Amino acid sequence: MLASVSRVTTELVDLEREIGAPGAGLDRLCLVPTPFVPEVRLHLAEDPIVWWARMEARAGHSLPPPYWASVWAGGQALARHLLDHPELAAGRRVLDLAAGSGVVAIAAALTGAAAVVANDVDPYAVAAVTVNARVNRVAVQATGRDLLDTAPAPVDLLVAGDVLYDRAMAARVLPFLHRAAAAGAEVLVGDPGRGHRPPDGLVVAADYLVPITEPTAGPPVRRVQVLRPG
């Protein structure tokens, strides 16, 4: 199944140019297997900070941090969980919230989801999902609306990898997740323990030890829990 065609944007043109450019180095995007989910290949930055600096210099203005250019531990664990339990997404409507690189959305599509929407407010992440879905030959619709203050769309499965990364984001995301669950969606969150998980309201569905690839001074492996409302 081929990736769905997204609207051509400046960001998509930029990423396609970057992917097609010759040469190698710390400021390049590379197509690589995801460490914990080798079934999924992603265009990731060799060094996201160096890549970001070059892109800002070329643009002549600030750009959002390229979180999509790394594959984060919460997303890796959630993608692994979907691939190991394909019944979770197969034949279902799936929304991947704060999709980043699209690893979770792509995993859902690989298991046979009926429809997959990947949402991220960063337009470069929307472009990254588009090119990553294309290279994995799956259909994913990438969108850039901020959904958190809206009523959840009718979906069967809502997945969110590493969304509880600070207090302000957790305060916005958690009510949205609980509204989606109350509306009938199954909700799964990949949480690497950044300290913003509430003391109740979420229960552990699975535990994984995930290799760390994002820029960090922490340990090379992190314990990640897949959580669900309960």
Image: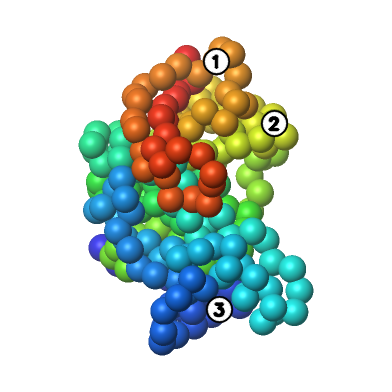
Give the image's coloring scheme.
rainbow
Q: Spatial distance from mark 2 to mark 3, Cα to Cα? A: 32 Å
Residue type beneath disc 2: Arg
Q: Earlier in the sequence, mark 3 or mark 1?
A: 3
Check disc 3 and report the residue beneath it.
14
Query: What is the number of callouts on the image?
Result: 3
Give the image location of residue 32, x and y in percent: 33, 63
| CA neighbours of label 1 inside 10 A, class few (<14), some (14 to 19), many (20+) | few
Give the image location of residue 136, x and y in percent: 30, 63
Taking the image as drawn, is residue 202 in sight?
A: yes
Residue type beneath disc 3: Asp
Front one among 15 and 49:
49
Residue type beneath disc 1: Gly
- The residue that appears at 55% across and 78% down in the rendered structure is 14
Check disc 1 and report the residue beneath it.
201
- The residue that appears at 66% across and 49% down in the rendered structure is 146
| CA neighbours of label 3 inside 10 A, class few (<14), some (14 to 19), many (20+) | few
Q: Most extreme residue toward the bottom, as rendered?
A: 22
Taking the image as drawn, is residue 159 in sight?
A: no
Q: Earlier in the sequence, mark 2 or mark 3?
A: 3
Front: mark 3 or 1: 3
